[in-house]
Image (cartoon, coloured by chain):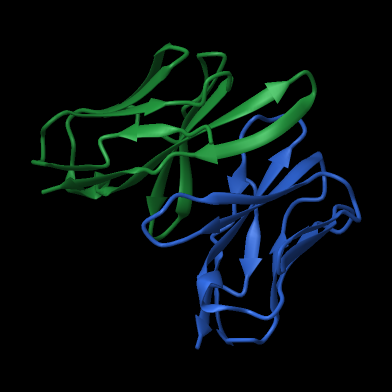
Amino acid sequence: DARVTQTPRHKVTEMGQEVTMRCQPILGHNTVFWYRQTMMQGLELLAYFRNRAPLDDSGMPKDRFSAEMPDATLATLKIQPSEPRDSAVYFCASGLWQGFTWYGYTFGSGTRLTVV
Amino acid sequence: ILNVEQSPQSLHVQEGDSTNFTCSFPSSNFYALHWYRWETAKSPEALFVMTLNGDEKKKGRISATLNTKEGYSYLYIKGSQPEDSATYLCAFKRSNDYKLSFGAGTTVTVRA
């Protein structure tokens, strides 16, 4: 089965440090999404890309978060500087549009981030 | 922000009993309604993608219906088993948007 691969699976870091999370979407998928799982809001959309172009990052705190897609096989989410309130599970998902047909998302296993 | 609401927030079911729960979503600009099953410490797993009004989908003992005119979908679990315990998420996709808007989920706990 094709999978979305996220690394690392777990990350513990000190407040103020830079954190980079990586996602390898399913080969051929042309949309990539970053979500954060929070207790209060469930799955919160942070940013997403279509054909590597950022379409919407309004869900991210711009001063410390950045999302990029340097090539079709890699998406990154960076937090600098990290804060304890950033502790959460971050999910990447990739999806496919073909013509006018939407084939849905597949989620990665998530990165559990703990900022102490 | 799109209003996708799921109810109830949680429910407890006796093993062998059947249950159902609701997802409501905006009825305008509808494109698709997704259901996901999300077990603790795992990633959400796609159950159904529904696009047509009146659609019914089935996967084993789990089935779903869709009413796009009134903006709701039901998920049914027949003869619940402990392995059905999970959070069930619905997600709405508009016709002019690439992203999904998720509900907060219904957490199902099946008691043996």
- How far from the left and from the top, in percent, is residue B60? 71, 64
In depth, the one of B22 and A71 nearer the eye is: A71
- Nearest the eye: A43 or A8: A8
Q: Position of residue B8 (x, y in %)?
A: 61, 75
For image coordinates 50% across by 87% down, the residue present is B111
Q: Quadrant of the N terminus of chain B?
A: top right
* Left or right relative to B105: residue A86: left
Quarter where residue B63 is shown: bottom right
Q: Is residue A90 above or below residue B84?
A: above
Chain in blue on the image: B
- The percent coordinates of residue A97 (x first, y second) are 69, 24
**Left or right of residue A4: residue A78:** left
Q: Does residue B1 appear in this view?
A: no
Q: What is the count of numbered marks?
A: 0
Q: At 58% from the left edge and 22% from the top edge, which residue is drawn?
A: A29
Dividing the picture into quadrants, the one containing residue B32 is top right
| Quadrant housing residue A70 | top left
Q: Is residue B95 visible?
A: yes
Looking at the image, is B68 positioned above or below residue B76?
Answer: above
Residue at 77% over, 62% down: B64
- Is B42 placed left or right of B66 in the picture? left
Chain A color in figure = green
Residue A69 x %, y %: 41, 16
Work out which residue is located at the far top of the displayed protein and give it: A71
Q: Residue at x 68, y 30 (%)?
A: B97
